Image (cartoon, rainbow, N blue to C red):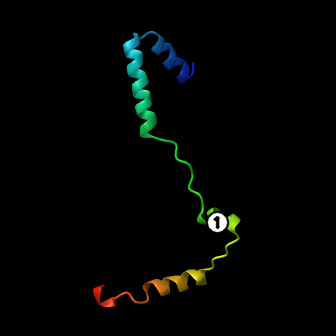
């Protein structure tokens, strides 16, 4: 007998109000541990846009963004 069959067998012996408690608990467990979809790669998000971003592009963007950041505050 597998776990599902054993649970069903026990469930059938319970009163309707206790069966509802079991259902409520099962729903609680399901919400507590939701199935997480794997995260998509950022490259996968823009793959169909034919965008080619290189490490040099990223370095240049960082330099432009942080170039005027006041260093004395660090």
Q: In this view, does 6 lie to the left or right of 49?
A: left
x then y, percent, for residue 57:
59, 82
Classify mark 1: residues with Cα within 10 Å, few (<14), some (14-19) or many (20+).
Answer: few
x then y, percent, for residue 12:
48, 11
Against 12, residue 29 (above or below) is below
x then y, percent, for residue 27:
44, 30
Q: Is residue 9 left or right of residue 15?
A: right
Residue at disc 1, secondary structure: loop
How many discs mark residues in the rendered view? 1
Return the residue found at the far front: 49
The N terminus - image quarter: top right
The quarter of the displayed image where residue 21 is located: top left
x then y, percent, for residue 30:
46, 35
Q: For the point 55% across and 18% down, which residue is it?
A: 5
11 and 54: which one is in front?
54
Q: For the point 53% across and 23% down, which residue is it?
A: 3
13 and 43: which one is in front?
43
17 and 3: which one is in front?
17
34 and 8: which one is in front?
34
Return the residue found at the far left: 73
Q: For the point 63% across and 79% down, which residue is it?
A: 54
Against 62, residue 36 (above or below) is above
Q: For the point 59% across and 58% down, which residue is it?
A: 40
Q: Is residue 39 left or right of residue 22?
A: right
The quarter of the displayed image where residue 56 is located: bottom right
The C terminus - image quarter: bottom left
The residue that mark 1 highlights is 46
């Amino acid at each position: 007998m597998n776990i599902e069959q054993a649970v069903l067998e026990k469930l059938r012996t319970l009163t309707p109000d206790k069966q509802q408690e079991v259902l409520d608990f099962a729903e609680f467990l399901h919400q507590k541990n939701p199935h997480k979809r794997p995260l998509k790669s950022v490259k996968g998000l823009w793959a169909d846009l034919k965008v080619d971003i290189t490490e040099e592009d990223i370095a240049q963007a960082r330099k432009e963004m942080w170039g005027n950041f006041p260093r004395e505050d660090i």
